[in-house]
Amino acid sequence: MKKNIKLIIAAVVGVCILLVIGRFGWVKFGEMMRGKMMATMMTPKVALSEVQEADVLPTIEAPGRVMAIDTIQLVPKVDGTLYSKHYKDGDFVKKGQLLLVLDPNKFIIAINRAKADLSSATAQARKADLDFGRAKELLEKDYISKATYDDTVAKKDIAYAQVGAARAALADANRLYGYSRITAPVSGKIGAINIVPGNYVTLQGGPIATIVSMDPIYITYSLDSKKFNGLRNDSISPTVKQEKPIQIEVTLPDGTLYPHKGTVDFYDNKISENTGTIDLRATIKNPDNVLIPGDFVKVKIYSNTPKKSVVVPQGAVLQDPTGRYVFTIDDKENAKIVRIEVDGQWEKNWIVTKGLEVGQKIITQGIVKVVDGKPVKALTAEEVEEFAKTGKTLDEVNENPQESKEK
């Protein structure tokens, strides 16, 4: 009997202990869950900024194409066997650099023959001079007839004419010899040669290779007539007496902004009847040969006339299927969505055409946890500066509010 009573007492004590432990555990678990809920429900901290107005240069974007200023096809001016090649395919060559040599032997022979002909003609001219001198003395003494004298004068003139012809022949022989040495007419990048040394080239055989100039280089683009005429008032089309040239920016096919700006220096004298567009052209530096002739790029053309525009930082603008929007706060410090319309970018800002006014306050930092209609805590400039010293952004603070609070 006593043994059974002891067992009952032990069981009751064990149950009490389990109840105490269970209650304590549930309390801790509840506190932990409440902590997490409080963390997730904590009001996000945000920084506000006033909508600004700036002097923005109007821009327009258009697809463009890279074009070499000079495209030279190397066509032989004389026939001959290709003797030697003095560059590698794809090299960058300089103006005047020796590229190809045709077999010079026949041209050297022609030069030597022309020199010999010139020497012979010169000797004949000297003899004709002597004959003329003697005939003149004899005519004065009336030892020869006037007809004989005239014949001597004619022979002298013929001899000097033959000297001139021989000199011309020598100059032509030297010219043809010069053509046997093909040099680069411009600086640029040379393509692959179509023949190899040992082949016979002719004037009718077409280009041997092509050289394209690389620096500077052209960017060509087109605008439709309506847009082009509308841009005249913004000084975005080039004029003859333009003090400040219009500039362009180029974005490469991979989305990289090209570091150099170009200058618009030409637009065509007519609008295409087929496309309704007019062609424009800009010249741009290309010292590192990044721009390749024939490549497609995106062109942004800048006006020379600043225009007052409403701008907001790009980081403050969000987007959903409906469009772009920003957050403001109402009198109760609740977040409120404001829909906006934009027309391009300026530096690191969006140019706003509708939805905002200058001086209006919008949320520019801590947007991650902001929800439309929910409360936010707007920080003062001093508080924002203090958070900046911690090395964390307000978005990071709002992501882990409990951690930030503990610190």
Image (cartoon, rainbow, N blue to C red):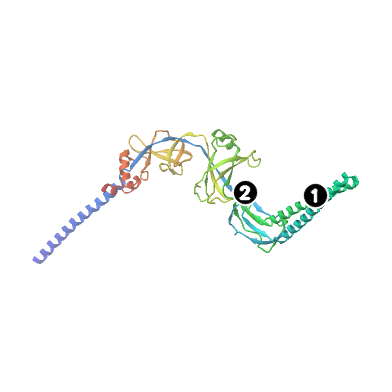
- Residue 14, percent from left and from top: 16, 60
Q: Secondary structure at mark 1?
A: helix
Q: Which residue is mark 2?
A: 70
Q: Which residue is mark 1?
A: 160
Q: CA distance from mark 1 to mark 2?
A: 45 Å
Q: Is residue 60 left or right of residue 107?
A: left
Residue kind at label 1, given as amino acid type: Tyr
Q: Is residue 388 left or right of residue 323?
A: left
Residue situated in front as seen by the camera: 261 or 359: 261
Residue situated in front as seen by the camera: 188 or 333: 188
Point out the residue furthest to the front here: 141
Residue kind at label 2, given as amino acid type: Asp
Vertical position of residue 115 compared to residue 282: above or below: below
Q: State the residue at coordinates (75%, 52%).
A: 167
Vertical position of residue 397 compared to residue 78: above or below: above
- Residue 287, percent from left and from top: 53, 49
Q: State the residue at coordinates (77%, 55%).
A: 119
Q: Is residue 1 visible?
A: no
- Residue 234, percent from left and from top: 54, 34
